[in-house]
Amino acid sequence: MKRRAFVFGGLSTLASFQHSRDVKADGHTGRVLILGATGRIGRFIAETIRSDGYTVRATTRNVDRAKQRIPGDYEWVQADVRDPRTLVEPLRDVDYVVSSIRSSQWVGGYNPEFVDYHGMQNLVDAAKAAGVKHFVLISTATSGPQVDQSKNPAKNYVRYFKTKGEEVVRTSGLSHTIIAPGRVPEEPGGEIPFILLDRKDYYVSIIKAGDVALAALDALTNPAARGKAFGLRNEPSVALGHWRTQYAEMPDR
Ligand SMILES: NC(=O)c1ccc[n+]([C@@H]2O[C@H](COP(=O)([O-])OP(=O)(O)OC[C@H]3O[C@@H](n4cnc5c(N)ncnc54)[C@H](OP(=O)(O)O)[C@@H]3O)[C@@H](O)[C@H]2O)c1
């Protein structure tokens, strides 16, 4: 059962990333593998990271469909996290990994257990074998170890299996950052300030997709973001860039 149709919009909003104000244009180099680059958040992440100077290798289960829908100078590769064999080539010569995937079905072959949990295990194993420098996981506010989700059957235990996927990353030995947004409007970032949140302090929060992307970009190379898990919320009352000072307050949960 397909959960919903993918609606791709906002090409012009992606382009406006170039004009956002909360950007440190460090002009990095290196190759970033982005899983979920066709997704609602992942496409903002892909464009933000590419605009910073990295080479972006973007995965999809259907390269032809992705190229038609998503403009951008990306190395498109086919990968399905359920099948470890499809992850070997995509990870060749990759410096960093960002995972912004989620199960595309509640029941069936692409359910949360197979994608968000076992798929994450496959991806982490492959990333370790490839020797990547840092792994960024985009998870969700409604999952995480701060709440026991093991008895929550909603949407075929998606919150539980996403929490298990996080645990795989957290215990992997990989340098990692876990970003757990709440509600995510598909809008560019960098204009309205935002803050980082300890996950025990919130359940639902609103953060623009472009701001999730800024945090993902920063996490690739900022030592302060290593071993941290946090949510984010747009917060007009603080200064732009305030979030960059908050990592020390964030735990790894
Ligand atoms: N969007 C939100 O409002 C929101 C809010 C809070 C948290 N989140 C979290 O943010 C992350 C991204 O969410 P999203 O809404 O951007 O996702 P989405 O729009 O539903 O896109 C899902 C992505 O996952 C990929 N994918 C699905 N199954 C896969 C598989 N077996 N192997 C490899 N890739 C697979 C899809 O790629 P192809 O279809 O191209 O293969 C697609 O790019 C998730 O962890 C989600 O829980 C999202």
Image (tube, grey):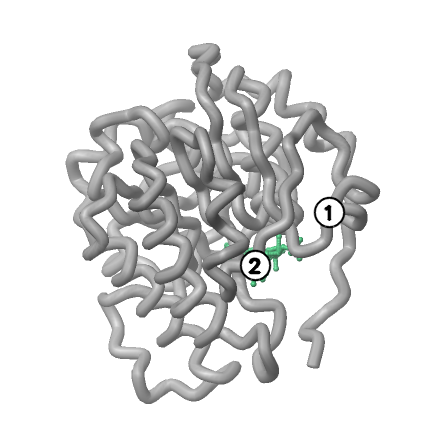
Which residue shows up at 48% across the image and 31% down it?
Answer: 32
Which residue shows up at 19% across the image and 56% down it?
Answer: 171
Visible residue check, residue 191: no
Q: Is mark 2 within 8 Å of ligand 1?
A: yes
Looking at the rendered structure, the secondary structure element under dot 2 is: loop
Horizontal and vertical percent for residue 145? 24, 67
Along the horizontal axis of the image, is 15 left or right of 252?
A: right
Looking at the rendered structure, the secondary structure element under dot 1 is: helix
Image quarter for residue 10? top right
Along the horizontal axis of the image, is 86 left or right of 125?
A: right
Which residue shows up at 67% across the image and 74% down it?
Answer: 3
The mark found on residue 63 in the picture is 1
Visible residue check, residue 165: yes
Would you call the spot at circle 2 few (<14 residues within 10 Å), some (14-19), or many (20 or more)?
A: some
| Residue to which mark 2 is pinned | 80
Horizontal and vertical percent for residue 86? 54, 54
Q: How many marks?
A: 2
Instruction: Please identify the residue farthest to the right as the structure is shown.
Output: 68
Horizontal and vertical percent for residue 252? 19, 50
Task: Give the answer, above or below, for where 214 lies relative to 183.
Answer: above
If the picture is divided into quarters, which one holds ligand 1?
Answer: bottom right
Name the amino acid, label 2: Asp
First in sequence, mark 1 or 2: give its number: 1
For the residues labelled 1 and 2, say whether their Cβ atoms are less than 8 Å apart.
no
Seen from the viewer's position, the closer of residues 108 and 10 is 108
Quadrant holding the N terminus: bottom right
Quadrant holding the C terminus: bottom left
